[in-house]
Amino acid sequence: MALDYEFGEQGDQLRSLLRQLIAERIPAGYLGAFSEDPEDLAIAQRFCKELAAKGLLTLSWPKEFGGQDGTLWDQTVVREEMWAHHEPRGAQYMGLNWVGPAIMEFGTAHQKATHLPPLAAGERIWCQGFSEPDAGSDLFALSTRAVPHADGWRISGQKIWTSYAEMADYCFLAAKVPGADGPGSISIFLLPMDREGIEVRPISSMLGPHHLNECFFDNVWASPDEVLGEIGQGSAIIRSSLAYERVGIARYARCDRLLSLVARALEDDADAVPAALRARWSRALIKVRTARLLAYRCVAAQERGDKSASATMASVARIAVTQCDQEVAETLFQLLGPGVLQARGPDAPFFGAMEDHWRYAQASTVAAGAIEIQRETVARAVLGRPEVPRRATGA
Amino acid sequence: MDLALPEVAEQFALSAERAIVALGGLELARGAEADPARRADVLLGALDALGVPDLDPRADLESAATAAELVRIAGRYVVPFPVVGYVMAGPGGVPAALASAPPLCVDHGDLFARWSVCDFSGTSTEARPAGAPFSSRLAPFVTPLEAVGPPKGGHEGDVALLCTLWASYLLGVAEHALELAVAHVKGRVQFGRPLAELQSVRFEIADATVAVDGLRELVRFTLWRVAQAKEEALADALAARLGALDVTKPVLRVAQQLHGAAGLATEYDISVLVRHVQPALRLPVDSDAMSDIVFGALGTHGFATLFPLHSTEAGRSE
């Protein structure tokens, strides 16, 4: 059958179950795990354990690693419902979505036994040690060094913009080893964050606490058992790992939910909305739908095993989704007026969800690959790779 | 979940494109201005040979998708014939057009003696040509019509299909415009290298690609939605037309801009696309007026979202 946009009975039941669980376990006004209130993180940690107990946390993982062999579309439902409701899995989504699968693909038996069961049980938070002060979009320019030591490795360097580093149990760390150049010099280390020599310093930001940190690695010891895959295989692991997360966060789902909340709140006053804003509102709904459909197109390509197409489609979807995120944030602000600027809490409109969304949306075109990088990826697929700039020749 | 078009529709599109290219592709539009009679002479026969008179987009999803693919191909070459209206006639019917308040104007309206014109609320009226085509550069064949029958309600399903088909037509236009721009910037050398190597150009092409890809998915989703929900999908279909307008206009602008002065010359295909698509962009209402129509429909019809837009539906989720 062609052209069918239903998730099917299984997908619909999964969505209903997740909404029911969220309604029962997550308090009204919950805006995510990352706040000044430690109870918000505790809620997320409890929720992860309950999802794990019900077999929902690692739904899409293979059964041999504690999953349910769920389909990519099941995973899509989970992503949509979680992000729509302010990601009640907190920081664990990253470990579930790509750290775990990367360990399944590249890890030793010992690494799988060490890391996968706690992830599947909802008990472990990971952070990602990729970006550095001089290696942002140009990730492979990183300068953190791993030097061979008698009994393993010694790692020194600085990571930055590291989300959840303060609360993380482990770091998926990229570092360069001596003896090679370029991407072939990068290796991945699975390091416990309580290892001596690691210091985390929070970076104050408009996103709120826990989102951005600096991590300093001062001669940190790593055992040979803590290298993921082969030495020098880091860039391939990173590319493969990020393929698990091609479509990324289902940002369109939160846009959809927030627009719906506002539509229901304003439904008796919709005619009083200025014409220009009504137009913007209509277009925002179309943008959300289009972004969702582009994300589905990428999932469908992944389902077919079409890696080449899914890579470009992922960048197309990311451009559409992140721009949609910012446009919806702006539309919501304009629809609700200045009261929306109030801080989160019971007195703020929608408990502050719109204010929270606007701040998050500003990061969407930067996080996990800046929109400029996504545009270049799309351009390469359509126009080819530009030649290296040439020197002028002749007189 | 299956995002692929029915194979029948894909095959039909290939046949339709072969037939239209064999007739000259964009040369049909260029030639029609010099010899307006060729429109019917050439294209009626070609469409009949493809079996279009037996195609009824109301029948089922496969037929609707086939019709959408036909009009997408028509859009790629801005075929000088009312293909959307003709395919909406269905077996034995009269061609259909979207119309708003008088004056009624339909592109290529002069080619048929009788029309069924539908406004966005689903009220249909029989109409006939009431004057000569505009003969302007942007609308050579737009023809005024006059209503000749009583208005009849209840045609929301036809309006939904018409909007979806027009969105597919505009998808074809936008696809071709982007292809023309890509070919031009890859071949045109300035400052010692192809324009395609300049980042500003690359980013514009990337953004246009995202827009066109998104419109393609939107059209497919709307086809499914309209086949599923019929008149209940009116807001979805109106939104598809608005989405198509909002994509096609900037994509055309960028594509023409990237051609430089050549983009204005009739010899260049982008110029023909830009001129001949104008009626489809402006009739019966342009994008800002369309957004108001969409907003009104959102208040009275469903709109397929993950979370309900209306409080009466909110009991089923949240």
Image: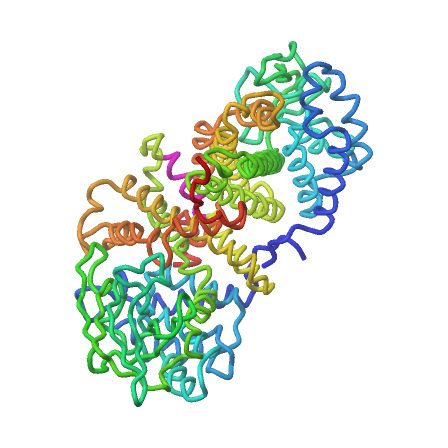
Q: Main secondary structure of the magenta part?
A: helix
Q: Is residue B178 above or below residue B134?
A: below
Q: Residue at x 51, y 84 (%)?
A: A64
Query: Is residue A171 within the magenta segment?
Result: no
On the image, the x and y values in percent for residue A285 come to 42, 44
Q: In the current view of this chain or complex, which residue is farthest to the front? A: A395
Q: Nearer the viewer, residue A364 or A226?
A: A226
Position of B229 with respect to B304 (left or right) is: right
Answer yes or no: is residue B118 visible.
no
Stretch in magenta = A278-288
On the image, the x and y values in percent for residue A37 come to 18, 67
Q: Is residue A167 above or below residue A357?
A: below
User: Which color scheme does this rendered protein use?
Assistant: rainbow
Q: Residue at x 61, y 34 (%)?
A: B169
Where the N terminus of chain B falls, by quadrant? bottom right
Q: Residue at x 35, y 31 (%)?
A: A276
On the image, the x and y values in percent for residue A222 come to 30, 83
Q: Nearer the viewer, residue A311 or A386?
A: A386
Position of B3 with respect to B62 (left or right) is: left
Q: Residue at x 50, y 51 (%)?
A: A294
Callout count: 0
Q: Nearer the viewer, residue A364 or A286?
A: A364
Answer yes or no: is residue A329 visible.
yes
Q: In the current view of this chain or complex, which residue is farthest to the top? A: B131
Q: Nearer the viewer, residue B15 or B68?
A: B15
On the image, the x and y values in percent for residue A16 come to 45, 65
Position of A44 with respect to B273 (left or right) is: left
